Image: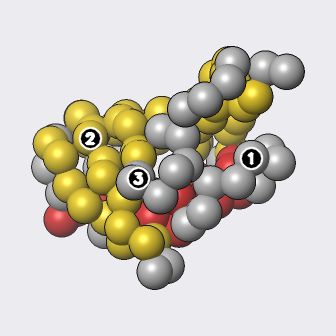
């Protein structure tokens, strides 16, 4: 990451894609990857995973407490900044880097 960034929290009760849609940050297919993770969360345990989102693959490091409660970091080699995410009773939250300038 070059430049100065601050992490901004954005939430949604619908999906990760909806939360990402409330920003103007280019994150590629990260929202698709996180929504795919959400839809098949029963197949994943805490750890490091590769998740497909569109034609891209993302690395996800996450801790799963229950099927509806988990948090982690999603990142890629494609130049997008890593984002933090969480899913809990309140819905979907992301903490995404926004250019501070």
Q: Residue at x 68, y 38 (%)?
A: 11
Which of the numbered marks, if any, corresponds to residue 74?
none
Residue farthest bottom in this picture: 55
Tell me the mark number nearer the camera, choosing from 2 and 3.
3
Vertical placement of residue 78 versus 53, above or below: above
Earlier-in-chain disc, 2 versus 3: 2
Q: Which residue is mark 1?
A: 25
Distance from disc 2 to disc 3, alpha carbons, whole Å, reads 12 Å
Q: Which residue is nearer to you in this view: 58 or 1?
A: 1
Kind of element beneath mark 3 = loop
Asked if labels 3 and 2 touch by Cβ distance under 8 angstroms, the answer is: no
Name the residue carrying label 3.
Answer: 76
Foreground mark, 2 or 1, reads 1
Q: Which residue is mark 2?
A: 61
Left or right for 95, reference 38? right
Judged left or right of residue 52, residue 2 is right
Residue 15 vs 72, above or below: the answer is below
To which quarter of the image does residue 37 belong?
bottom left
Residue 14 found in image quarter? bottom right
Q: CA distance from mark 1 to mark 3?
A: 15 Å
Residue 50, percent from left and from top: 25, 61
The quadrant of the picture occupied by the C terminus is top right
């Amino acid at each position: 990451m070059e430049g100065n960034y601050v992490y901004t929290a954005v939430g949604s009760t619908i999906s990760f894609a909806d939360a990402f849609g409330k920003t103007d940050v280019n994150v590629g297919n990260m929202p698709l990857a996180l929504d795919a993770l959400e839809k098949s969360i029963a197949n994943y345990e805490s750890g490091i995973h590769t998740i497909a989102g569109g034609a891209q693959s993302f690395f996800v490091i996450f801790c799963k407490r229950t099927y509806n409660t988990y948090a982690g970091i999603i990142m890629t080699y494609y130049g997008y900044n890593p984002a933090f995410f969480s899913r809990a009773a309140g819905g979907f939250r992301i903490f995404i880097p926004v250019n501070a300038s």
